[in-house]
Amino acid sequence: MNQPAYKPCSFSLTDGSRVQISQIGLTDQQDWLDGFELLSRESRYFRFFSSMPVMPDHIRVSLLTTDVNRMALGARLLDSNDQIANQRIIGVARYFRAEDELDAAEPAVAVVDQLHRLGLGHLLVRELGKFAFQHGVTRFVARALPENGKVRQMIVGSGGVLVRREEDSLVYAIDLLNGSERYRYRPPRKPH
Ligand SMILES: CC(C)(COP(=O)(O)OP(=O)(O)OC[C@H]1O[C@@H](n2cnc3c(N)ncnc32)[C@H](O)[C@@H]1OP(=O)(O)O)[C@@H](O)C(=O)NCCC(=O)NCCS
């Protein structure tokens, strides 16, 4: 069964730049790879839990295959006319849920380094969370490397609670059921 579609939406980042968020899939492979090339070594490590100098084909295909249990949203920059400025995908958020636990899903997010701290990561996860909730997911179970302070802060700021420590990662639960407020639009922060 195919995943129901997410309607593309446009948003402003805190520096005023505009982005469009849309559902992405296998037809977006080149645009996605163009964005992957702009992730620093550290961001790749934090996202994939491995240095990932080159993206293996099978992982790329797996990350971009969507169905009822796998969803991926991608962001593209818009120009001053609110048209897609560049096909490159500058941020991605996706989730996966196991067939035996359909109310929980594991999210992952990455934003190209040059656009960090402009609100895009939060925006992607918020949109993903809203979509997930509409499709029966009531909680995200998120994994973070202990040294990834940025995403840990982001998770805790979204109401995430540390539920366990695994060998190499920390596992947080984020309640989407009571968290709809948290996933509602927040006004952009002032640029700093
Ligand atoms: C984590 C990541 C997605 C955040 O994206 P972003 O667009 O920079 O995030 P935002 O600007 O929306 O900030 C969201 C929150 O993240 C946290 N955060 C982001 N950058 C931070 C930093 N440099 N220091 C501390 N907290 C930070 C904050 O809580 C922030 O909320 P606030 O600004 O209201 O305090 C980005 O750093 C990234 O792509 N990292 C590499 C991949 C990764 O770590 N993925 C997570 C594991 S799957």
Image (spheres, grey):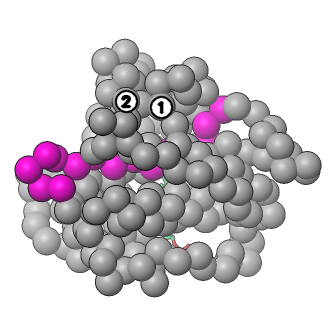
Q: Is residue 4 visible?
A: yes
Residue 53 image offset from top left, x and y in percent:
41, 23
Residue that sits furthest to the front in the current view = 1
* 172 or 175, nearer to the observer: 175
Residue 119 image offset from top left, x and y in percent:
61, 65
Residue that carries the numbered disc 2 in the rendered image: 65
Residue that carries the numbered disc 1 in the rendered image: 25
Measured along the vertical axis of the image, is residue 72 above or below residue 36?
Answer: below
- Do the residues under discs 1 and 2 have CB atoms within 8 angstroms? yes
Quadrant (top left, top right, bottom left, bottom right) of the C terminus: bottom right
Q: Residue at x 56, y 63 (%)?
A: 123
Q: Residue at x 11, y 62 (%)?
A: 165
* 126 or 165, nearer to the observer: 126
Q: Which mark is residue 76?
A: none
Q: Quadrant of residue 139?
A: bottom left
Q: Is residue 155 left or right of residue 102?
A: right
Q: Is residue 114 left or right of residue 70?
A: right
Residue 127 image offset from top left, x and y in percent:
50, 61
Amino acid at pointer 1: Gly
Segment tinted magenta in the rendering: 88-102
Neighbourhood count class around disc 2 (C-alpha, 10 Å): few under 14, some 14–19, many 20 upward: some
Labels 1 and 2: the sequence-earlier one: 1
Spatial CA span between label 1 and label 2: 6 Å
Measured along the vertical axis of the image, is residue 44 above or below residue 57?
Answer: below
Amino acid at pointer 2: Thr
